[in-house]
Each structure stands twice: as C-alpha cells, then as structure tokens.
Image: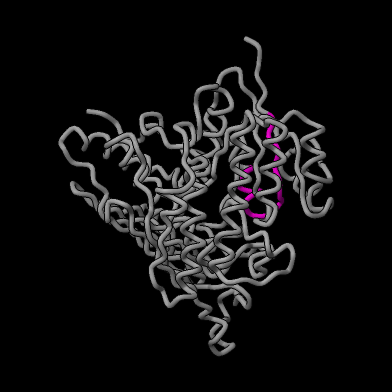
Amino acid sequence: MAEQTIRVGINGTGFAANYTAATYGMIPHRNGVSIELAGVVSGTIENARRFADQHGVTRVWDTHQQMLDGVELTIDNICCANFAHGQYTIEAAQKNVPVIVLEKPPVIWPGYAEQKTATARTRKYESLAFLDEVLNAVQNSRSKLLYAEDFVYFDGVKGLVELLVEARATGKGKVLYLRGTCAHQGSHAPAYDTPALSGGGALFNKACHPLGPALFLKQVEGLLESGRPIRPVKVSGLALQVLKHQPEVSGEFFRVMQNVDDFARITVVFEDQTVAEVHGHDLSISGIRNELSVITDFAQFDLRVNPNNEAELFLPDAMHAGNLLLREKLPTPQGTSFPRPNQFNSHGYVNEMSDAVACALISDQFPQSGALMAWDTMAVLMAAYESAEQNCSFIDVTEFTTKGRQFNETEMPTPARFGRVFQRR
C-alpha cells in the first residue's frame, strides 16, 4: 500500500503553535499515513528557525503566502496572533488547501489595522462583515474549515453528545443551562495586551473557550431534535479591568493588563429560551481553570478538566519537580497540587487535530467545529462587548444568527460521527 503524506503548515511560533506541532505527533496511528510538518512561518525568521529545529519542521518560510506557493499543504494551521487570522484563512482558501485549522477567535476588528476608534456596536458590524468575507472565501474554494475551539473536543463534551443521542430515545434530550469558566493569571502571549493584535482581553480570548461547547451542544441538540441547530438570540456581557485599578502590590502574581479587560461574563439566551453563562478572567492565582457544567432535562454533567483531582501530588519542596509543568499555568509545584498528565489529550487538542486529519483523508467528512461555530462565536463575543458598553443590557443577535447568515450541512456538527468515549453494555 502506497504511503500517503499529510503535509502540515504552521503559522506562528508561540504557545498555540507549540501545542499544535506537538499534538500532530500524538495522533492515533493510521496505516499508510505519515504526517510531515512541512513548513513554519513566524513574525521573525529567527523564531521560525528555532521552532523548526525544536519540532522537526522541514522548512522555514518568510511569509504565509510563500509557504502556500512553495509546498502543497494538506492542512494549514493558523495559530498565530489573532490579527492575521482572517487574511491567512483567505490566502489558504484561495490555494484550496484541503483543511484550514483556524484558531480562536476567528478574526479581530479590521479597524485596528487602520488605527481607528469606534463604538462596540460599530466594531461588531464591521468584524462580522470581515468574517463574512473570510467564510465566503472558504465556501468558494475546495477547502474545509475547522474552527479550532479545543473545548468542543473535550472527551467530556463528546460523551455528553453520546448521552444526548441516547436520551432522545426516551423523549428527553433538552439542554437547559450551561455554565463554564476559562481562567488563569494572565496570558503569556506578548500580543495579548495590545487590542490591535489580540482583538480584546478576557472576554474575547478566554470566555470564548467555554462559549464554544455551549454553542456546540445547543447546535447538536437542535440537529438531533429537528435537523436544525438551536442558535443564540440575545446576549448580555460584562468586561472589566480589575487588576489595573488595584494597588501595585495586588498584581504580584498576575500579568496586569493595561489595555484589555481581565474579567468577563457573558450570558447567552437561545431561541428555545434556554441559557448559557460563561466566565473568562485573568484572576486565577492557582493556574488554569477549565470547567463546564451542563444541566439537561435528564441529568447534570460537570466537567472539571483542569484542575481535576484524579491525581494528587504533595511536594514539600518545588526543586524536586525540576522543570516539569504539572498543570498549565501552575505558578509553583510546591505543596498539594492536582497534576494533569497528558494535558494535550485532556484539553482536546489531540481530538481536534485528529478531526483535521480525518477530514483531509475522507472526502465526505467535515469538521465537527466549522464555519457555524466560528460565526456564532464571533456574533456573541462582539455583541457582549456592545452590551458591556450599555451597562450589560441584552443585545439582539438574531440579525446575524436565526435571521442572518445561513449554513449548509457540511458547516455544522454531525453528532453521529463525533466519536465515542463510553463503553457499551
């Protein structure tokens, strides 16, 4: 049997690019298929060379377009700073790259590049108009878009989809209330505190994570029930700069943001009058927190992804752990901690990239998290900033969701193909 090579391009050399490159080496084996990290692009050629040496990337490129022209990519991973997401996606689509993996959030307000200022309402309209262009470019190509929200790919979310399928046979299966959190003590990405590069703070870059599975599970519920996803209709948001306004000593264990929000809350009301509440913040002194709780009409399912107490460690002295990172963003291993072995698996990255590889190999398979997820996420995030400017009042988003851009089946989840994580009796 002839071997097939999946050629992967990586844009960026920061945190997201590092876990992306590492994850491809952890994907379950497929006979006759090899994965080559064929190219990397960075803001500086020195960073690209360092990254290539570290991860065994075949070649370094000066620009994204040069990489696309120089190698026939199978998968293009856009995991660079947020400001480049939209343009890189358009470039990849124009080259008909089979699978485009777009990290979250999908785009930022294009006015930042022109050093404009505008109300959140204007930023919302202009950002979604730009995303519309991006998604149209993908639709007009032979590419498949995977919106890389790793929270969607948690094993626990996959398991809840299985439960929803089973509950349908008993007349149940309504998702009533979702609550989620993503938090740590401040992103280490240099671009994070610059809105023109990151697009926003905790609301845009952290609350987006638990928002993803909340939107996804309502999409799945609707598809199982009626063949049509259940979508958001109104949004309330809060975005604050907490640490910036505290005494300097209060910021000792945090990265204090000067230009973006470090605390956010989003409330989403769906068209069936069910609710999701998500939080994102930079105030977690104890390392990363990734949590999701889902109440349905037949069960409550709580996902404590990180920290998780399946493993407990006590170290009287941190020196004995060497340079081991026991849990993402854990400031010290000293004392009692809950280490998270195989974090790339638990955080959904392996499931996510496995989906990308499967979509590259199987012509009629499309990403579980696709254009619909990217669009509704962006609509909610931008409406939440508008709400925050209007004292948390609810903002109607139906002009973008139920009455707005429509999506075909290949851009939506397919619950039957999401995969199984539970054994069967």
In magenta, the rendered stretch is 7-21
The image position of residue 288, as x and y in percent, is: 48, 62
Task: Quarter of the image for the C terminus: give it.
Answer: top left
The image position of residue 168, as x and y in percent, is: 21, 35
How many marks are shown on the rendered structure?
0
Q: Evaluate whether residue 99 shows in this view.
A: yes
Identify the residue shown where x is 56% and y is 77%: 253
The image position of residue 366, as x and y in percent, is: 50, 30
User: Can you say whether 374 is above or below 267 in the image?
Assistant: above
Front in this rendered view, residue 169 or 143: 143
Is residue 14 rendered magenta in the image? yes
Q: In which quarter of the image is residue 396?
A: bottom left
Front in this rendered view, residue 415 or 383: 383
Task: Say left or right for 214 vs 90.
Answer: left
Q: Evaluate whether residue 156 shows in this view.
A: no
Identify the residue shown where x is 55% and y is 61%: 124
